[in-house]
Image: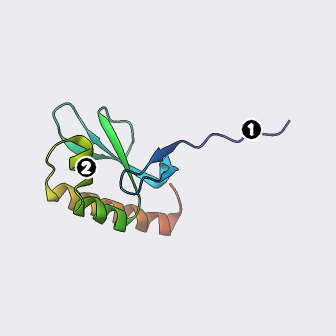
Amino acid sequence: MAQRQRKIPMRKDIVTGEMLPKKELVRVVKNKENEVAIDPTGKQNGRGAYIHLDVDVAKQAKEEKIFDKAFGIKISDDFYDELIAYVDHKVARIKLFGHE
């Protein structure tokens, strides 16, 4: 019997609108207190939105204030800078070690 291929969970990148495998994206979550955070586990409670693990996409998210629009709240530039640094770090790790 042939082994069934496992379904790859796909999510939409809110910057580019592309559907991508979940593991190529980073989840950003807004909780009930309107706090926005990077969600490395992908399991935090709250409303989630995804962007591609790509520094250019993260920078575009900052320029266009993508998460402000997605969550309907004002988000500080510090958060976007943190997101860009996080994505940059993850991309570097993937280049070194492959997908975690």
| Closer-to-camera residue (47/91) | 47
For mark 1, what is the residue? 4
Q: Considering only vertical position in the picture, is 70 above or below 46?
A: below
Local crowd size for mark 2, using a 10 Å CA cut-off: few (<14), some (14–19), many (≥20): many
The quarter holding residue 83 reads bottom left
Residue at figure coordinates x 30%, y 35% from the top left:
47
Instruction: Tell me the quarter of the image containing the N terminus.
Output: top right
For mark 2, what is the residue? 67
Q: Considering only vertical position in the picture, is 13 above or below 56?
A: above
The quarter holding residue 5 reads top right
Name of the residue lying farthest toward the right:
1
Say whether disc 2 or disc 1 marks the residue closer to the N-terminus.
1
Amino acid under disc 1: Arg
| Closer-to-camera residue (77/1) | 77
Tag count: 2
Amino acid under disc 2: Phe
Q: Position of residue 61 (x, y in %)?
A: 28, 59
Badge 1 element: loop
